[in-house]
Amino acid sequence: MADKASFKRLKLYSFKLNALLEITQAINDNLSISHLLKRYESILKDELNIGRIALLKRNDGWDTILTTGLDRDDVASIDVERDLLHIEEISFVTSSPNERLKNFDIIIPVITQDTPLAYVLIGDIDEEAEGISPTIKHLHFIQTISNVIIVAIENIRLFNESLRQEAMKKELELASRMQNMLIPENSSLPQDKHIHFNAFYHPHFSVGGDYYDCIALNKDEFGFCIADVSGKGISAAILMSNFQANLRALFTDEIPLEQLVTKLNDRVMESAKGEKFLTLFIGKYTVSRKELKYINAGHNPPILFEKKKGKLSMLRKGCVGMGMLDEIPKIESGTHTIEESSKLLCYTDGLVELVDDLGIEFGTEKIEKHISNDRPIDKNIQEIIVGQRILSGNQAIFDDITILGIDFTPVF
């Protein structure tokens, strides 16, 4: 009799050891989550004769990652927060009044560092066997192997998530490099003795939804713009890249600004389908006529400063933003004759919405103070960058910041 009992104990220990070794080997071999779950299911179903199994695991919420012997609909009504979270030890629920647990006899929590990671729900156990049901005798073993499986699955999930994040990081870095190729550098901006461009571009994330451009249309005319897509991130950057391609294709010395804006609006509507829009300030300066013509399409109004007069002007005339309406009902262009040395500062709302240590927005008044002097526009822009700590860790930055400045020295 003693030999028979010893043989049973040896067989039991051998089964448990082999099961744990097999699971451990599968983990070491980096087998998939589905493979681990199939092996886990086989141990409980085929070797322990458990008829119904449900395994609920914590991810961002709670997910059912395994069901055996029942439909997922039988588990769908179970709310972990309401029905299971209070269970901290192996519990028998055969006689539970909770109707949602009627398919199960035993609940086994998997808890690590006082945090529940999973719940194993089992039912239809082999109660016809002689003596105590094998399932009852193996409950702590089931809890142990469940713990091993859940921790392994969580490690796989975290590893895959880190790979996904690393891949996304590399994609963002590539997107950032590609987008930066579309943003003109100061050294490439058209310059002559009558007009001087200077710009600053600072995306809040790796890629941004701001854009500026300056184009020498011919020897006598210069086109320029600044734009800001609604929203942030990849979708805003894609729309802005598409807009840049259309602007470059359409902006010539022959097309009137009103017609250009109409065509740009059509292209934005085609690309964004009304889900996003962009604000735009676009201008054309004719050196020989000393004429600045512009359209402000819902953008922050640039500020023009005429040095001798000491006069500040906000350039507001225009229309609604690009992509807001299928057809723009009215476009009003503005014209300004540059009669003396003047400066124009264009900017996106990321600049004016910056707040200082007292919670006060940068606003347009400070922009006016920065340009109301005889210093060149590039010095004014640098003073703004340094004064607002834009490149030195200002924690108040929550949007892209773009500045485009122009010095006009008219022909006399």
Image: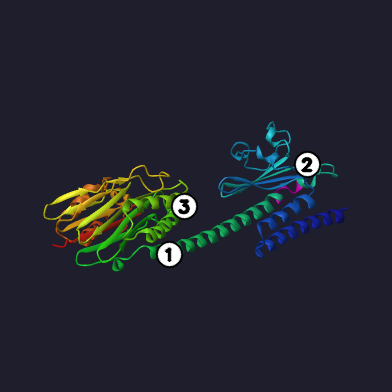
Using residue 18 as the reference point, say whether residue 235 is left or right of it. left
Using residue 40 as the reference point, say whether residue 85 is left or right of it. left
Q: Position of residue 201 (x, y in %)?
A: 33, 59
Quick check: is 133 in the magenta stretch?
no
Q: Is residue 49 above or below residue 237?
A: above
- Disc 1 crowd, CA 10 A, few/some/many (<14, 14-19, 20+): few
- Disc 2 crowd, CA 10 A, few/some/many (<14, 14-19, 20+): some
Q: Could you tell me which secondary element the residue under label 2 belongs to?
A: loop
Distance (Cα) linking label 1 and label 3? 19 Å
**Of the numbered discs in the image, which one, if any, rests on residue 178?**
1
Q: Disc 2 marks which residue?
A: 124
- Judging depth in this view, the residue of 296 and 203 nearest the camera is 296
Q: Position of residue 154 (x, y in %)?
A: 60, 54
Distance (Cα) linking label 2 and label 3? 57 Å
Identified at 62% across, 46% down, the residue is: 63
Q: Nearer the viewer, mark 1 or mark 3?
A: 3
Identified at 59% across, 39% down, the residue is: 81
Q: What range of the chain is rendered magenta?
A: 136-141
Q: Is residue 177 visible?
A: yes
Question: Marks 1 and 2: CB-CB under 8 Å?
Answer: no
Q: Could you tell me which secondary element the residue under label 3 belongs to?
A: helix
Q: Could you tell me which secondary element the residue under label 1 belongs to?
A: helix
Q: Disc 3 marks which residue?
A: 271
Distance (Cα) linking label 1 and label 2? 60 Å
- Under mark 1, the amino acid is Met
